[in-house]
Amino acid sequence: MRLTHSTSDGQHSIDATLAVVAAGWAAATAGLDLDRVGVRTDRRGYVEVDTHLRTTTPHVFAAGDITGRALVVHEAVREGLVAATNAVLGPTAVLPPQLSPIGSFTDPEYASAGLTEAAARESREVVAATVRFDSLPRPIIDGRQTGFCKLVVDRELHTILGCHVVGERELAQLAATAMAAKMPVEELALVPFSFPTYANALGRAAILVAIELDQTGIWTLDHLGTAVEAGLA
C-alpha cells in the first residue's frame, strides 16, 4: 500500500506492508446496568467521576480502568486508595499531583514521564540532553543498542521536567522518582549508578545537562559539599 501526503514542499509518498490504526478502547460496562442506580457513563462507556472519584450517584465511587483515565495498574492502585478513603471517610481526598510514567512493553520498550521538550519550551527555558544506547557498554554487551534516554531540565530552576526513553522503560521510573523529589539535575548527575547498567544512560544525560548549565564544573563541588555536610550532620 502507498500513502500519499502533502507538505509545504510538495507531495510525498510512503510505501508500507501494514497499516495500523489506534482507535482507543471502549469500556465493557454495558451489562452493568449502571443507569439504574444513576451512575452516568460517557459515549465510550467509561464512568464519569469528579476530582474525588465520586460518580454521578454521590455514594458510589469508581477507580481504575473503568474511569477511562490512565489505563495502567499503578494509576489504578492510586485511584483505588483515594476512592476507598472517600467512600469511608467522606469525599475530601483527591489524587496527589504525582508523576506517573507511561509507556508500553513493546520491542523496544518505550516510556515517558513529565513534559516533552516541545511542551516544556512553551512556558520556560529548558536544557535537553539525549544519550543513545549504542554509546553505552551494557546495551552493546546485550546486543540491544537500539534506544536512547532524553532528559528535559528547567534552565532556571535546574529541576527535571521530563524524561523520555526508548529501549529500557525502567529509566523513566528512576527519573520520575527524582522529579517527584524535586532533585536538581546536578544531584542526579552525582548518583553512582552501577556500571555497566542501562541506568548509566540516565546518569550521563544528567551530567551533560549539568555541564551545559555550568561548564566551569563548580556545580560538582557545590553538590558534593552539600552531600558531605548532610552526611556529617
Image (cartoon, rainbow, N blue to C red):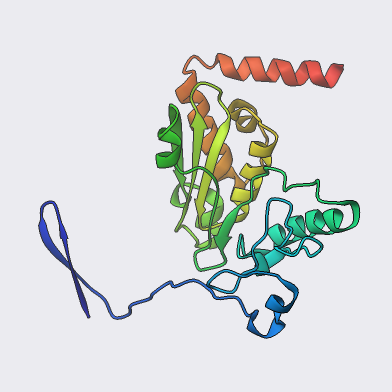
Q: Is the N terminus in the top left, top right, bottom left or bottom right quadrant?
A: bottom left
Q: In which quarter of the image is residue 195?
A: top right
Q: Nearer the viewer, residue 46 or 135?
A: 46
Is 188 on the left-hand or right-hand side of 164? right
Residue 147: image location, x then y, percent: 46, 55
> Residue at coordinates 51% horizontally, 37% vertically from top-left?
205
Q: Quadrant of residue 170?
A: bottom right
Q: Which of 99 and 79 is in front in this view?
A: 79
> Residue at coordinates 77% horizontally, 18% vertically from top-left?
228
Q: Which of 79 and 182 is in front in this view?
A: 79
Q: Which of 106 and 10 is in front in this view?
A: 10
- In the picture as drawn, the residue positioned furthest to the left comes out as 10
In this picture, is 146 found above or below 199? below
- Observer able to see residue 86: yes
In this picture, is 21 found above or below 78? below
Q: Is the C terminus in the top left, top right, bottom left or bottom right quadrant?
A: top right
In this picture, is 204 found above or below 87? above
Residue 58: image location, x then y, percent: 77, 60
Q: Quadrant of residue 158?
A: top right
